[in-house]
């Protein structure tokens, strides 16, 4: 069994708006970040996507399927099969996870 962490991707409200304008759907998208921020990540790996500001944030769950060098400094990250989760905020998700009488 291979153990891998869940990667948390955070997008500002502005970055999320631009991504939504470029792609009508958010189930599959790519973005680029500096190599140093991604050096410990190995694809495929699950990800929790936190988008927007705390009062209007949205949470998605997806799969990082590939990491590819695109320049001297940047790596392209491909996310697939992303879907919105409920509860839809970090606070509500945290409360659900720490709830003692879950089952």
Image: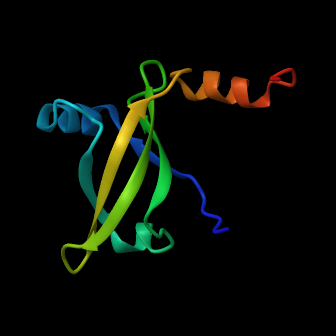
Would you place residue 6 above or below residue 70 in this image? above
Horizontal arrangement in the rendering, residue 23 relative to residue 80 (left or right): left
Horizontal arrangement in the rendering, residue 53 relative to residue 29 (left or right): right
From the image, which quarter does the N terminus lie in? Answer: bottom right
Residue 43 x, y percent position in the rendering: 43, 66
Residue 65 x, y percent position in the rendering: 36, 59
Residue in the picture at 16% in, 30% down: 24
Q: Nearer the viewer, residue 76 or 91?
A: 76
Residue in the picture at 39% in, 56% down: 64
Residue extending farthest to the right is: 100
Residue extending farthest to the left is: 22
Would you place residue 35 above or below residue 5 in this image? below
Q: Nearer the viewer, residue 29 or 31?
A: 29
Residue 86 x, y percent position in the rendering: 53, 21
From the image, which quarter does the C terminus lie in? Answer: top right
Residue in the picture at 33% in, 64% down: 66
Would you place residue 79 above or below residue 61 in this image? below
Residue extending farthest to the front is: 1
Image color mode = rainbow
Residue in the picture at 43% in, 25% down: 57
């Amino acid at each position: 069994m291979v153990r891998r962490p869940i990667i948390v991707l955070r997008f500002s409200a502005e970055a999320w708006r631009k991504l939504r304008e470029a792609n009508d759907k958010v189930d599959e998208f790519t973005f680029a970040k500096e190599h140093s921020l991604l050096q410990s990540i190995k694809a495929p790996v699950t990800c929790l996507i936190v988008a927007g500001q705390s009062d209007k944030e949205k949470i998605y769950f997806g799969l990082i399927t590939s990491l590819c060098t695109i320049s001297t400094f940047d790596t392209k990250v491909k996310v697939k099969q992303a879907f919105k989760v409920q509860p839809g905020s970090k606070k509500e998700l945290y409360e659900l996870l720490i709830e003692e009488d879950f089952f």
